[in-house]
Image: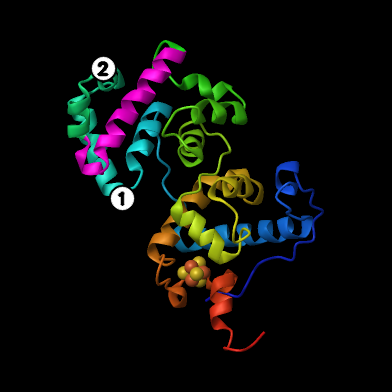
Amino acid sequence: MNETRVPPPTAEVTVPPELARLGITAEQLAAWRAKALAVHQRLLEHYGEPRLPRRSPLDELMLTILSQNTNDRNRDRAYAALRQRFPTWEEVRDADPEAVVDAIRVAGLANQKGPRLQAVLRAITRERGNLDLGFLADLPLEKARQWLLRFKGVGPKTAAIVLLFALGKPAFPVDTHIYRVTGRLGLRPPNLSVEKTHILMEHIFPPETYAAAHLNLIRLGRDYCHPRKPRCDACPVRDLCDYAAAQAQPEGSP
Ligand code: SF4
């Protein structure tokens, strides 16, 4: 195990208003930034640079809606089946709802996801006259985010995934793994909501690290930081982790 390498938070830090409203201080922000960078570097050493997905914004949006409450394998199987049955998104939009549900059944919750996919496709068509989301690349980050969030079934995580991976915008998606892992590491206040964790992560990781940090933190959550029994003994960021430090305290010590 490497020595702890969190640099002391010395730089002057200004707390942006959206974090000040959450009661976050300059000292906390500086400490989280230093730790976030140390965790990111350690995960790069451990896992390497992850391969980034390259999809169109609409492909990414549809895939992410399909991924809700399922694993990557079933998500990918459902996506492949859907694309095989309906090669264009226009065909998915205009298809018999039962046929869409049938195609994506392996993803689970198909009766919800099928109508949701079609509703989003219809809503985009109503707004834009077509299904091309390329225009989002030209909008400022917050405008693009709000545009995506208007659709039922598109929450902060889904919007951030589309913005980050398909449009190259500085959004940090927080899924269930990242929420759990950042809580245990001590990279956010324990009771911060998932929605506000998105905002905080965008202020503590440097934008150029978002994609790799997001993917490697998910991997850490799957490989080591399991919900019930985290494998702290083998974890590559154990020496940076508040949860592991608390577990190592002898009982009864302050
Ligand atoms: S040390 Fe344990 S609690 Fe901390 S990130 Fe690793 S597995 Fe999770």
| Picture residue at 73% right of the left edge, 57% below the top | 30
- Disc 2, disc 1: CB below 8 Å? no
Residue type at mark 2 is Asp
Q: In terms of image quadrants, where is residue 42? A: bottom right
State whether the magenta stretch is mostly helix, strand or loop.
helix
At horizontal 58% and vertical 50% (from top left) the residue drawn is: 197
Magenta region: 104-127
Q: Secondary structure at mark 2?
A: helix
Q: Earlier in the sequence, mark 2 or mark 1?
A: 1
On whether ligand 1 comes within 8 Å of the CB at mark 2, the answer is: no
Residue at the image position 34 percent from the left and 30 percent from the top? 116
Q: Position of residue 219 (x, y in %)?
A: 42, 57
**Residue occupying the far top of the picture:** 129
Nearer the observer, 56 or 100: 100
Mark on residue 94? 2
104 on left or right of 157? left
Which image quadrant is residue 118 in? Answer: top left
Label drawn at residue 198: none
Find out whether residue 17 is within the magenta segment.
no
Placement of 78 over or under 247, stated as above or below: above
Residue type indicated by callout 1: Asn
Q: Which mark is residue 71?
A: 1
- Considering depth in this image, is 197 or 133 the residue closer to the camera? 197
The picture places residue 140, in percent across and down from the top left corner, at 62, 26
- Vertical relation: 134 (above or below) 155: above
Under circle 1, the secondary element is: loop
Q: Is residue 123 magenta?
A: yes
What residue sits 78% from the left and 55% below the top? 26
Quadrant where the C terminus sits is bottom right
User: Whole-percent x and y of residue 229?
Assistant: 40, 72
